[in-house]
Image (cartoon, rainbow, N blue to C red):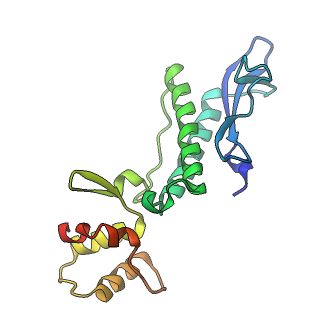
């Protein structure tokens, strides 16, 4: 994805002159960190006035909010914080979370209802985690499928190959499955399933 896809416009309010006070949130091209592109040169304001004809602030911000949520869910679908810590993916996820925070604050500050979120079954990271020894362990999609197979199998699966076959069938995978180093490091998960 190009960095342009990570630029979002939060339309704050319509000014007396008809312009719209706008916050532009984007990614710094060198560092990957979240920046406010609309910040004035002297740093006195994060907002710039923009010309927008016939704008419905709530509708515009709702559409952008839902887009950011969808992008975040797409990134989280196979995200594994153990393997991807401090990576480019981590920067993207953190950026999207910050953007969601700006929109959330706008909705709350203006007493507007948050848009109704579409359902994303099995994509939210919080739904794909387990607790082991009082510590929350986040799972990627394949790890989650393995746990589901182990928990829900009517017949005991005796070998890693039989587990892999069932998981691959569930994930519609056609490649050979190898256990993640995360599972090797956290093998206690298998014993608690």
Picture quadrant of residue 28: top right
Q: Residue at x 50, y 36 (%)?
A: 115
Q: Is residue 31 visible?
A: yes
Residue 103, image quadrant: top right
Nearest the eye: 62 or 49: 49
Q: Residue at x 40, y 72 (%)?
A: 181
Residue 167: where, in percent of width, then height? 36, 78
Q: For the point 47% across and 40% down, which residue is it?
A: 116
Left or right: where does residue 152 sit relative to residue 79? left
Is 99 or 70 nearer to us in this picture? 99
Residue 181, compared with residue 105, is above or below; it is below
Residue 124, relative to residue 26: is it above or below?
below
Q: Is residue 37 above or below residue 41?
A: below
Q: Please, which residue is most extreme toward the top here? A: 16
Horizontal side of residue 168 vs 99, given as left or right: left
Q: How many marks?
A: 0
Viewer-proximal residue, 21 or 90? Answer: 90
Which of the pair 85/103 is nearer the observer? 85
Residue 187 sits above or below residue 5 on the image? below
Q: Quadrant of the N terminus?
A: bottom right
Left or right of 98: which side holds 121? Answer: left
Residue 8 visible, this angle = no
Q: Position of residue 60 (x, y in %)?
A: 65, 34
Q: Position of residue 44 (x, y in %)?
A: 72, 16
The C terminus, quarter of image: bottom left
Q: Is residue 87 left or right of residue 114?
A: right
Q: Position of residue 75 (x, y in %)?
A: 53, 56
């Amino acid at each position: 994805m190009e960095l342009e896809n990570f630029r979002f416009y939060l339309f704050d309010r319509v000014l007396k002159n008809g312009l719209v006070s706008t916050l532009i949130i984007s990614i710094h091209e060198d560092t990957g960190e979240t920046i406010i592109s609309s910040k004035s040169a002297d740093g006195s304001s994060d907002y710039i006035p923009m010309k927008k004809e016939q704008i419905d602030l709530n509708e515009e911000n709702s559409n952008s909010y839902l887009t950011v949520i969808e992008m975040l869910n797409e990134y989280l679908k196979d995200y594994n914080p153990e393997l991807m810590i401090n990576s480019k993916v981590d920067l993207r996820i953190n950026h999207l979370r910050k953007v969601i925070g700006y929109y959330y604050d706008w909705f709350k500050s203006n007493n507007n209802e948050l848009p109704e979120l579409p359902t994303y079954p099995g994509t939210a990271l919080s739904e794909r985690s387990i607790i082991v020894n009082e510590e929350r362990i986040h799972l990627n999609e394949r790890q989650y499928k393995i746990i589901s197979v182990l928990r829900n199998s009517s017949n005991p699966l005796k070998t890693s190959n039989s587990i892999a076959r069932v998981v691959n069938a569930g994930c519609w995978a056609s490649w050979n499955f190898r256990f993640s180093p995360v599972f090797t490091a956290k093998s206690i998960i298998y014993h608690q399933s």
